[in-house]
Image: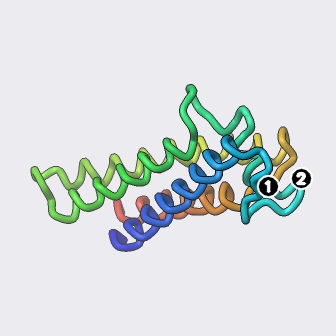
Amino acid sequence: MQLTIIILAIIGILLSIYAYYIERKTRKNKHYHAVCDFNNTVSCTKAFSSKYGHTFGVSNSIGGIFFYFLILILVILSIYNIYNLSSIIINSIFYLTIISMIGSTYLAYASYFKLKNFCMICNAIYIINILLVVFSYFWIW
């Protein structure tokens, strides 16, 4: 379980870094065309540049980088059982992934129904978050 969660967290970090790259590139060059932009309804740029691309004034991609990095650190701490807090850390990972799943559900709703947009990077992140919930749940039990 731990290795799977580590791999998912690393993929989440990489996707979030790419999302941030697109966001920065688009901000500097309005004519930038990201690899994940196919048309007006399948566009990562549209999702990242919308009002739903930021939470409390912070880019969701920055939040994702920190979230997945935190999950990675917590898994490593639990593997080495640092401070004998392994069970508390594992439970914390599960609850953090639940919170990320709630956020992903809201952002998916906003993307599909409010923006009428399909963001490939966003959807990959939603899948990562679903898998993190599932694997952290099985890790607890």
User: Which residue is the site of mark 2?
Assistant: 40
Instruction: Judge left or right: residue 112 versus residue 34.
Output: right
User: Which residue is the site of mark 1?
Assistant: 43
Q: Count neighbours of disc 1 (C-alpha within 10 A) and say few if under 14, some if 14 to 19, many if 20 or more.
A: many
The quadrant the N terminus occupies is bottom left
Which of these two is toward me, 134 or 61?
Answer: 61
Residue shown at the point (34%, 60%) measured from the top left? 140
Q: Count neighbours of disc 2 (C-alpha within 10 A) and say few if under 14, some if 14 to 19, many if 20 or more.
A: few
| Secondary structure at numbered mark 1 | loop
Instruction: Judge left or right: residue 110 versus residue 67.
Output: right
Alpha carbon distance from label 2 to label 1:
6 Å
Position of residue 6 measured from the top left corner of the image (x, y, whole percent): 37, 67
**Numbered mark located on residue 82 in the image:** none
Residue shown at the point (25%, 61%) measured from the top left? 76
Q: How is the image coloured?
A: rainbow
Looking at the rendered structure, the kind of residue marked 2 is Asn
Position of residue 100 measured from the top left corner of the image (x, y, whole percent): 52, 46
| Secondary structure at numbered mark 2 | loop
Which of these two is toward me, 3 or 91?
Answer: 3
Is the C-beta separation of discs 2 and 1 under 8 Å? yes
